[in-house]
Image (spheres, rainbow, N blue to C red):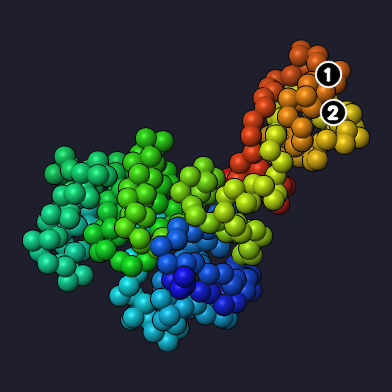
Amino acid sequence: MSMAIETKNLTKVYDGNTVVDHLSFQVKRGELLSLLGPNGAGKSTIINMLTTILKPDEGTAFINGHDIRKDKEKVRQIIGITPQELVFYDELNARENLIFFGLMHGIDKKKLKADAEEILEQLGLADRTDKTKNFSGGMKRRLNLAINIIMDPEIFFLDEPTAGLDPQARHVVWDYIEEVRKQGKTIVLTTHYMEEAELLSDRVIIIDRGEIIAEGTPEDLKEKYSEQNIMEVKFKDETNITELKEKLKDLEFVKDIIIGPDKEISVYFDGGIINFTKILNQDIISDVTELEMMRLRQNSLEDVFLKLTGRRLRD
């Protein structure tokens, strides 16, 4: 399968700080790739370079074979971007904004009107005829996405499209991204929501401090970097943390113990319920008066990130 995107040593430096550090990766045609990392990891800078908004300091990238340095106009003709910033006119309503941007993009007016109605309906904006300056933050984010969709690009760049949305609005956006995927479009999504990347992605690249620290399918990453069973414990008294680590470190089925930013303890272990029972039999845990919280769960991309960096994604 040919590549929709290929980066080679892509690098960006601001004020002596390397925010994107010699990144090389590929995105297949029709693939949804998530760039996953905390705020400040370099995700938006990568998007801005791939969409020709920023010039790389080193390296380059190819979008459907077009060099972002040498073929900017050709690149811009085949991409669409939903930036974090709002890009529409707040004195126009949602339909007027879509019609305006569609006409600017050279789309047939009759087709444009039909497409606009369908997109607004699916994103839950069809009933709003007032000026967009009156929209809630979540509605504005959805309209931002709608403007990208109306352009019908070959490659979508979605930069934190659900940032600030409530759970219901996020699911509306997720559903529509799935619809776009079914059309065979290539999508690059940046997010700091682990569940979003896990649900939508064919493949994930985890970025921290401008570098790729892991990449693969969500399932491959979880299998490679995180055991299947995680017990989370939080004590009322933080002095119990050291004692628990000492008691568990010699159990051969305990693979790792990580202390989170809120002093919660994540115990990664093999062996299922039998070994879970052995952990529960430790005196310090069996004394429930010492516990503020305890739960058993399966691993997620959040655990992968925690394992690789020692902190949670949204810290």
Residue 149 as seen in the image, left or right of residue 230: left
Residue at 37% in and 55% down: 181
Choose the circle earlier in sequence order: 2 or 1. 2
Q: Is residue 87 above or below residue 136?
A: below
The reply to whether residue 220 is in sight is yes
Q: In the figure, residue 207 lies in which quadrant? A: bottom right
Which amino acid type corresponds to the residue marked 1 in the rendered image?
Answer: Asn
**183 and 237: which one is in front?**
183
The reply to whether residue 50 is in sight is no
Q: Residue furthest left?
A: 110
Would you call the spot at circle 2 few (<14 residues within 10 Å), some (14-19), or many (20 or more)? some
Q: CA distance from mark 2 to mark 1?
A: 12 Å
Which quarter of the rendered picture does the C terminus lie within? top right
Would you call the spot at circle 1 few (<14 residues within 10 Å), some (14-19), or many (20 or more)? few
Q: Marks 2 and 1: which is nearer the front?
A: 1
Residue 38: percent from left, percent from top: 58, 52
Residue at 45% in and 58% down: 32
Could you tell me which secondary element the residue under label 2 belongs to? helix
* Residues at marks 2 and 1 touching, judged by CB atoms closer than 8 Å: no
Residue 57: percent from left, percent from top: 55, 80
Q: Mark 2 highlights which residue?
A: 244
**132 and 177: which one is in front?**
177
Which amino acid type corresponds to the residue marked 2 in the rendered image?
Answer: Leu
Residue at 67% in and 27% down: 296
Question: Which mark identifies residue 281?
Answer: 1
Residue 237: percent from left, percent from top: 78, 23
Could you tell me which secondary element the residue under label 1 belongs to? loop
Residue at 82% in and 36% down: 254
Q: Is residue 101 above or below residue 135?
A: below
Question: Which mark identifies residue 312?
Answer: none
